[in-house]
Image (spheres, rainbow, N blue to C red):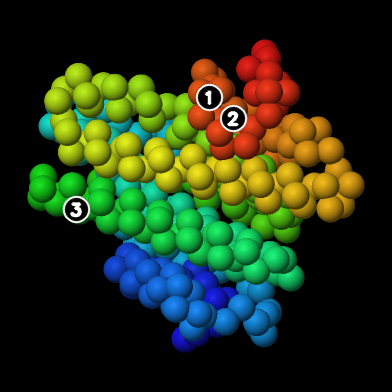
């Protein structure tokens, strides 16, 4: 299986298995590195409603998720299981972005394949850490709303780029530094190492979202800052992302001062 869209379809529709998804993702990236992966668009795009997920974890609404105390063993386990789910869903989100939107520059597909591979690496780091507590991914419930933005933006590339990398993923740039500080206080070096790795990669993932959003807006003669606001107002569940926002990291990731001022305005 050497065609990127066939691999993506397998990951999204014929899978539903954690280990198989990880293997397929890493193999695709290795093939691309070796110039063995093809990018010919030779198959129709299937409806997003058919995407399959593993049977576990049980998915709950955010209000039913348990509170986490990072100073306790149970809290650490619950926190990292939640982050494992975020990273696992991020693999799906990267594959779906690559799969669903066609006839774009080759670099776009290579960027999101690289992101899918890095999200898989993040998931594996967290999974290994959870296993030191005799816990595996799926043993605890997880947040059930992470896929909703993908479904809502399945027919709009600019909306997808605005909502997934520039809202959902960008939230990690705001909250992760303070969580790293908490684990540093608790002298949990392994947790700090994992979260620092994820944060560094996520800055670049959001930057790729910003780059392609801005480029595609300009190509169709839209003002990127105005269109970002329009997409958030139209699609973001809850009205608008909540702060506080990490301006320093968001600017590295491609946000303008005007965008940040708008996000921060009540």
Residue 103 appears at what percent x and percent y? 74, 70
Asked whether disc 1 touches disc 2, contact meaning CB atoms under 8 Å apart, the reply is yes
Q: Which residue occupies 32% across, 47% down?
A: 84
Residue furthest top as drawn: 266
Tag of residue 251: 2
In this view, 65 is above or below 3: above
* 3D distance between C-alphas at marks 1 and 3: 31 Å
Q: Nearer the viewer, mark 3 or mark 2?
A: 2
- Dot 1 alpha-carbon crowd within 10 angstroms: few under 14, some 14 to 19, many 20 or more: few
The residue under label 3 is 128
Residue 193 appears at what percent x and percent y? 24, 38
Q: Is residue 128 left or right of residue 52?
A: left
* 3D distance between C-alphas at marks 1 and 2: 5 Å
> Where does the C terminus fall, quadrant-wise?
top right
| Of the pair 156 and 30, the residue shown nearer to us | 30
Q: Is residue 52 left or right of residue 177?
A: right
Tag of residue 248: 1
In this view, 228 is above or below 38: above
Q: Is residue 201 left or right of residue 214?
A: left
* 3D distance between C-alphas at marks 3 and 2: 32 Å
Tell me the element at label 2.
helix
- Dot 2 alpha-carbon crowd within 10 angstroms: few under 14, some 14 to 19, many 20 or more: some
In this view, 232 is above or below 16: above
Q: How many marks?
A: 3
Residue 225 appears at what percent x and percent y? 77, 33
Q: Is residue 183 visible?
A: yes
Residue 118 appears at what percent x and percent y? 40, 56
Tag of residue 17: none
Q: Is residue 100 left or right of residue 29?
A: right
Residue furthest front as drawn: 34
In this view, 198 is above or below 259: below
Q: Quadrant of residue 96?
A: bottom right
């Amino acid at each position: 299986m050497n065609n990127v869209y066939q691999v993506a379809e397998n990951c999204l529709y014929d899978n539903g298995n954690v280990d198989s998804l990880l293997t397929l993702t890493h193999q695709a990236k290795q093939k691309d590195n070796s110039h063995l992966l093809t990018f010919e668009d030779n198959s129709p795009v299937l409806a997003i409603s058919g995407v399959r997920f593993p049977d576990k974890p049980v998915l709950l609404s955010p209000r039913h998720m348990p509170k986490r105390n990072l100073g306790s063993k149970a809290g650490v386990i619950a926190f990292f299981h939640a982050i494992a789910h975020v990273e696992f869903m991020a693999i799906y989100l990267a594959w779906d972005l690559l799969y669903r939107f066609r006839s774009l520059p080759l670099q776009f597909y290579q960027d999101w394949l690289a992101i899918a591979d890095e999200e898989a690496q993040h998931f594996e780091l967290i999974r290994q850490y959870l296993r030191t507590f005799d816990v595996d991914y799926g043993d605890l419930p997880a947040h059930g709303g992470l896929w909703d933005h993908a479904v809502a933006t399945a027919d709009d590339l600019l909306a997808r780029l605005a909502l997934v990398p520039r809202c959902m993923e960008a939230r990690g740039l705001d909250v992760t530094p303070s969580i790293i500080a908490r684990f540093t206080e608790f002298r949990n070096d392994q947790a700090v190492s994992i979260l620092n790795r994820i944060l560094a990669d996520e800055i670049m993932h959001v930057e790729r979202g910003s780059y392609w959003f801005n480029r595609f807006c300009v190509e169709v003669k839209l003002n990127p800052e105005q269109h970002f606001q329009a997409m958030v107002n139209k699609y973001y569940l809850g009205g608008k992302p909540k702060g506080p926002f990490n301006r320093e990291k968001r600017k590295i990731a491609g946000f303008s001062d005007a965008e940040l001022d708008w996000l921060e305005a009540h």
